[in-house]
Every structure is written in C-alpha cells, then in structure tokens.
C-alpha cells in the first residue's frame, strides 16, 4: 500500500495547493464568472482524488493476492464471485492464455482492469459496496469524515461538468469557498481512513477463506469400577 498512499498524498497536495490559490484569488478578484469556474475545477480535482485512490487501492488488493500466490479456491466466496465477473467482462482469451502459467493464481491479476472500477460513479455508497464485496471495513470516524457523504455531491457535479449538463459557472455559483473547504477536508479524511482500512485488510490477508477449526476431540468417559 506504500505506493498507493504516496500517490494519494501527492494528489492531496495538489488539491490543497489549488484550494489555497483559489481562496486567495477569489478574495482579491472582482471577476465573478472566473471565481465560479475556479470553484468548479476544485470539484473536478476532488473527484480525481476519489477515483484514483479507490482504483489504486483495489488494484493493490489484486496485486497483493497475486504476489502471495494465493489460489482462487483459497479466496473468500464473495471475492471469487468478483473475479468471475471481471473475467466475463474483461477477458481477451488469446492474451489471457498467452500470459498465464497457473490459471488458479494468475486469474487474480489477469482478469482485472483497473480502468473499469469506477466508470465515473464512485461515491460513498459505491465504496461501501466495494468494501462489502472485497471484505474490507468501510467504517470511519463520522465526526471527521461524515462517512463520505460529500462524495455523492462531488460525483454528481463532476458528471454534470463532464457531460455538459451544466456549465462551470452554473455549478460554481452553488458553493461558497467554506462549502468547498468542508467538502475537501471531509473527503480527504474519509479516503485516508478507507486506505488505512484496506492496508489492515492486506496485512491480515483478510481476502483468504477462513480456515475451518477442527472440532475438539471428545474425552472418553471414565469407567467407574
């Protein structure tokens, strides 16, 4: 997870740098339309942070499973279902056959396509669903993160801008700098805690099927003379 967290911190730094510039610019600017455009751009940067962080984290799960040479049959049932769905959606039979040595192990990595994790639709609910599917915790400190509630707004506004539903000035006029600061802080805190949860999941290899505990041997009854 080290590289995932480094990338996360780099993008957080981009967001913080941009927010500081935007806030300072708006305080001294009389160009209202430009101020709105700058606010809309921050929402795009926040969505970029969300999507990259979650996509990289899920890719790291697949990489970790493959690196530990965990067989398909040793994985939790929910995760096996995910792999089969990935296989059906992403499989190129020719390249798959050419790239595998042990199908039970190589399927973990070869059927995965990171670019298809999001499809522009990652928000708090999607992250909770992914956590349930893979088996990592999506619980966070509500007072710091609001459980990712801001992500549904960020996702919706990003899609409005990406699809041209609304202009940058139309979206930007809806939010004050303090609104955006709150969304930024809650989003960063939420993603940071989710990445910590994924790291703990990987450390404990919680993707493995639990090993059944054999029943305790019964003690023979003592014969009474």
Image: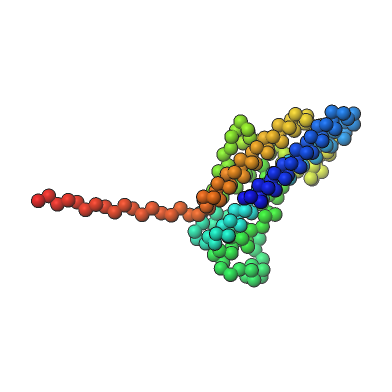
What's the residue at 52%, 62% (across, down)? 71
Q: To which quarter of the image does residue 45 belong?
A: top right
The x, y position of residue 150, in whole percent, is 68, 36
Q: Residue furthest right?
A: 31
Q: Relative to 35, is 211 above or below?
A: below
Q: Relative to 122, is 95 above or below?
A: below
What's the residue at 64%, 68% (across, down)? 99
- Report how many numbered discs are placed on residues in the image: 0
User: Going by the image, does 159 lie left or right of 30?
Assistant: left
The x, y position of residue 62, in whole percent, is 60, 56
Q: Relative to 215, is 137 above or below?
A: above
User: Going by the image, does 11 lie left or right of 208?
Assistant: right
Q: Nearer the viewer, residue 109 or 8?
A: 8
The x, y position of residue 76, in whole percent, is 51, 54
Q: Residue furthest left?
A: 225
Q: Is residue 170 visible?
A: no
Q: Is residue 32 visible?
A: yes
User: Going by the image, does 72 lie left or right of 191?
Assistant: left
Q: Nearer the viewer, residue 5 or 146?
A: 5
Q: Nearer the viewer, residue 67 or 172?
A: 67
Q: How are the colours assigned in the image?
A: rainbow
What's the residue at 63%, 35% (across, down)? 145
The x, y position of residue 3, in whole percent, is 66, 51
Q: Relative to 154, is 85 above or below?
A: below
What's the residue at 56%, 57% (across, down)? 65
Q: To which quarter of the image does residue 101 belong?
A: bottom right
């Amino acid at each position: 997870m080290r590289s995932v967290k480094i990338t996360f911190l780099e993008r957080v730094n981009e967001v913080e740098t941009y927010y500081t510039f935007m806030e300072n610019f708006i305080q001294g600017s009389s160009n209202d339309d430009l101020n709105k455009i700058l606010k809309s751009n921050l929402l795009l940067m926040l969505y970029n942070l969300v999507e990259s962080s979650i996509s990289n984290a899920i890719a790291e799960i697949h990489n970790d499973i493959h690196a530990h040479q965990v067989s398909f049959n040793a994985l939790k049932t929910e995760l096996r279902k995910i792999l089969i769905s990935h296989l059906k959606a992403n499989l190129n039979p020719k390249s798959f056959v050419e790239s595998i040595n042990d199908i039970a192990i190589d399927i973990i990595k070869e059927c995965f396509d990171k670019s298809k994790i999001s499809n522009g639709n990652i928000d708090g609910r999607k992250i909770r669903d992914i956590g349930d599917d893979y088996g990592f915790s999506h619980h966070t400190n509500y007072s710091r993160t609001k459980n990712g509630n801001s992500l549904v707004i960020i996702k919706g506004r990003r899609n409005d801008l990406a699809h041209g539903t609304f202009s940058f000035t139309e979206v930007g006029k809806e939010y004050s700098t303090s609104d955006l600061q709150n969304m930024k802080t809650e989003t960063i805190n939420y993603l940071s805690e989710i990445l910590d949860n994924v790291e703990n999941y990987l450390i404990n290899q919680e993707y493995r099927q639990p090993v059944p505990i054999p029943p305790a041997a019964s003690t023979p009854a003592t014969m009474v003379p």
